[in-house]
Amino acid sequence: MIYLRAIGIKPFKPVNEEQLISYLSSKKVSIENVYQIDSVSFVQLINTKKKDTLIYNKLHLWIQNHVQPLQTICFDNETQKPIYAYFNCIAESKGLTQFTWNKNKELESFPPKEYTSENCIDSLFTMTELTNTMVDFKGNLLRLQNNGKRYSVFLYYSLFVQKQANNIIKETITHLNKYAPNEYNLYFVNFDNCLYQLTKSN
């Protein structure tokens, strides 16, 4: 328990739009739209994919990736396919209490080759399937920006691991600005309420 508190893990609890606006503002990121994962549509999507065990040879691993509280997934808008992804389960430690995805300079290239293997990127969900689980606090689906940029990047974050959410936000933005400046749209998607509902129902 002491270690969990040290790395910033808090109990699951619901969050509201004002909390997320306050948090994202503190990170100096765009808050034009505040999105979250809709638990009903997300669970329906997961359950649909669980039936396809003969199609996906790494189904369990890929599903586990997509229920992580911290994720960065980058899609190429031309192909509609993911080109890299990383999750909190593959983070390494930096010091005693910080997570990093760049300990061995993984984020010093684009795309980061260590995060392009089939253990990281998958064909399980299309970009449309994922965005159909992302809603604002009025229930409206996420609307992709149509501004000609090549990449759509989805950064999933959770306040129950806020200390590590700070790290993935900082490292993701630093990496994109260094290697793909002005080529991406970045969407921040909160996972707290969905994870709260999932743990509550188990």
Image (cartoon, grey):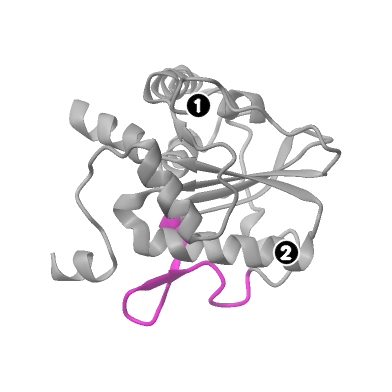
Q: Was residue 134 drawn as part of the magenta stretch in this picture?
A: no
Q: Where is residue 39 in the image (x, y as percent from the top left)?
A: 38, 25
Q: Where is residue 47 in the image (x, y as percent from the top left)?
A: 41, 20
Q: Is residue 146 visible?
A: yes
* Residue type at numbered disc 1: Val
Using the image as rendered, state which of residue 56 and residue 146 is in the foreground. 146
Residue 39 lies left or right of residue 146; in this view the side is: left
Q: Distance between the residues labelled 1 and 2?
A: 26 Å
| Mark sitting earlier along the chain (1/2) | 1
Specify the label residue 177 is tagged with.
Answer: 2
Q: Position of residue 3 (x, y in %)?
A: 20, 70
Using the image as rendered, state which of residue 151 and residue 139 is in the foreground. 139
Which residue is at a point 75% across and 68% down the rendered structure image? 178
Q: Position of residue 180 (x, y in %)?
A: 79, 59
Which residue is at a point 34% across and 40% down the rendered structure image? 192
Residue 183 lies left or right of residue 193; in this view the side is: right
Give above or below for 90 relative to 78.
Answer: below
Which residue is at a point 45% across and 36% down the rendered structure image? 63
Give above or below for 150 relative to 53.
Answer: below
Give above or below for 168 relative to 185.
Answer: below
Q: Is mark 1 on a helix, strand or loop?
A: strand
Dots 1, 2 in contact, CB < 8 A: no
Give the magenta-colored segment's residue range: 88-106
Q: Can residue 119 be seen in this view?
A: no
Which residue is at a point 29% across and 68% down the rendered structure image? 7
**Which image quadrant: the N terminus?**
bottom left
Residue position for label 1: 135
